[in-house]
Image (cartoon, grey):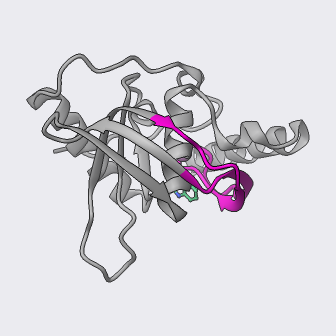
Amino acid sequence: MAIREILVVPDPRLKLVSKPVAKVDDKLRDLMDDMLQSMYAADGIGLAAIQVGVPKRVIVMDLAKSGEAPDPRYFVNPVLSDPSDNLEPYEEGCLSVPTVFDEVERPDRIKIKYLDYDGQPREEIAEGMFAVCIQHEMDHLEGVLFIDYLSRLKRQRAVQRVKKLEKDKSREDAA
Ligand code: GNR
Ligand code: NI
């Protein structure tokens, strides 16, 4: 297992549309293991493969609260359907847009079909934080970030903020 670097804006790879996975095999499980470890290391609750530079339709997630037992979840080739009419706002963040948080409205309930860690087909209804997170991660598979739902001004500010953060970080590393 290895911790992989998480891409941040404005990396153009974050805009790619990810490709379906042909087979859930050991190589894909290695990727999912690395993604989960990288997500935990970055204190995230979800991660899409493109965030570590791999344009495949793979998501990992762990919504366990701190102090609770870990609850790793894996979603391969996920498909969402039957969104509720009711939208709920939630203050979102993204490991690819560090330190930026803003409100996004999404359906509060949605159906999800996917293949699990063993390649078995599964179907669930997502609600609450699960609904927020799975829709945020599905957007990554389409090259969409939560800041794309904000005003152009807010989006530009967000990207500038991350650019500065990265610049300051690379200066620190050099010093
Ligand atoms: O760690 C994360 N927290 C989060 C908070 C609110 C809404 C969505 C998320 S997902 C994010 C990790 C991430 O960037 N996944 O793509
Ligand atoms: Ni994200």
Residue most extreme to the bottom: 67
Tell me which segment is drawn in magenta: 80-109
Quarter holding ligand 2: top right
Work out whether residue 47 or residue 21 is closer to the camera in this orientation and state it.
21
> Residue 163 vs residue 154: left or right?
left
> Residue 36 vs residue 90: left or right?
left
Which residue is drawn at the image coordinates 76% and 45% (left, top)?
Answer: 158
Say which quarter of the image contains residue 8.
top right
Percent x, y of residue 165? 66, 49
Work out whether residue 75 or residue 110 is closer to the camera in this orientation and state it.
110
> Compared to 66, does 42 lie above or below?
above
Percent x, y of residue 167? 65, 42
Is residue 89 rendered magenta in the image? yes
Is residue 170 rendered magenta in the image? no
Percent x, y of residue 154? 85, 45
Which residue is drawn at the image coordinates 68% and 62% (left, top)?
Answer: 90
Percent x, y of residue 27? 14, 27
Total number of numbered discs in the rendering: 0
Q: Quadrant of the N terminus?
A: top left
